[in-house]
Image (cartoon, grey):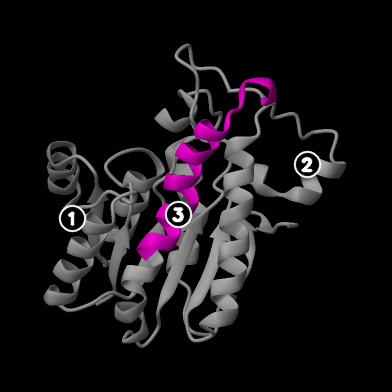
Amino acid sequence: MTTTLITGANKGIGFETARQLVAAGHTVYLGSRDSGRGSRAAAELGARLVVLDVTDDESVSTAAARIEADGGLDVLVNNAGIEGRTADGGVVNAADTTGDFMRTLFDTNVFGTVRVLHAFLPLLARSPAPVVVNVSSGLASISGAASSPAYVYPGVAYPASKSSVNMVTVLYAKAFPNIRINSVEPGYTKTDLNANTGTQTVEEGAEIVVRMAQIDSTGPTGGFFSAHGPLPW
């Protein structure tokens, strides 16, 4: 049976990904910073709660030790992320972006991804078909931002953090060729991350995450994918 960890999974795309993977037969560890919300979500889905704050080394190490003691890990979905909206739900624009604001987003979106990867790589290395899915964003595409008239996002920090996640994906895929490591773009999905301004359902947003979490050892690695296929960097 495939054992999967999903970070930030007590709501939104992470929760829906957990639901679909439990239905597909995975043993799912539902990562959540909040034990109460996580417990309720795990009970609803038939998943296993693991309290996990991707910004905290001790929390991540404790989670890794717990999952290792339970038998190991096959699939890691780095889903936990923040966008950093203003109090009224708006995007923090370029003029208002500060170093501290960038640091906050990078701590979760980039450093958190690396922190979790580092802790769980030894477990993944023991799996016969290890997979990592890093949840990125179409806003991470540098070529899209530079050349597409449709790219109109006014902020800086969130796209920059997800571009960094994509580079992390490429370099880890090169460093660990036996692990299938890819970034995915769920699409503009209605969740708390974007103050529920998205236009897709969580079912639609989770589709590519679930698909890439289930690839085998012949599947792609080091790529960036949406539900419609590969995306430009």
User: Dot 3 surroundings within 10 Å: few (below 14), some, or many (20 or more)?
Assistant: many
Left or right of 32? Residue 95 is: right
**Which amino acid lies under the numbered mark 1 shown in the image of this protein?**
Val
**Magenta span contains residue 146:** no
**Image: magenta residue range:** 94-116
**Magenta span contains residue 100:** yes
Q: Does 178 appear above or below 224?
A: below
Q: How many marks?
A: 3
User: Dot 1 surroundings within 10 Å: few (below 14), some, or many (20 or more)?
Assistant: many
Instruction: Please provide percent x and percent y for residue 56.
Output: 28, 51
**Mark 1 or 3, nearer chain start:** 1
* Label 3 residue SS: helix
**Mark 3 or 2, nearer chain start:** 3
Q: Does 140 appear above or below 95?
A: below
Instruction: Please provide percent x and percent y for residue 183.
Output: 56, 60
Among the 4 quarters of the image, the one containing residue 177? bottom right
Left or right of 208? Residue 229 is: right
Q: Nearer the viewer, residue 63 or 189?
A: 63
- Dot label at residue 145: 2
Q: Main secondary structure of the magenta part?
A: helix
- Residue at which label 3 appears: 111
Q: Does 54 appear above or below 116?
A: above
Instruction: Please provide percent x and percent y for residue 186.
Output: 54, 47
Q: Nearer the viewer, residue 98 or 143?
A: 98
**Which amino acid lies under the numbered mark 2 shown in the image of this protein?**
Ala
- Dot label at residue 50: 1
From mark 2 to mark 1, how far is it between C-alphas?
37 Å
Please name the residue shown 27% across and 48% down the image. 53
From mark 3 to mark 2, how far is it between C-alphas?
23 Å
Asked whether disc 1 touches disc 3, contact meaning CB atoms under 8 Å apart, the reply is no
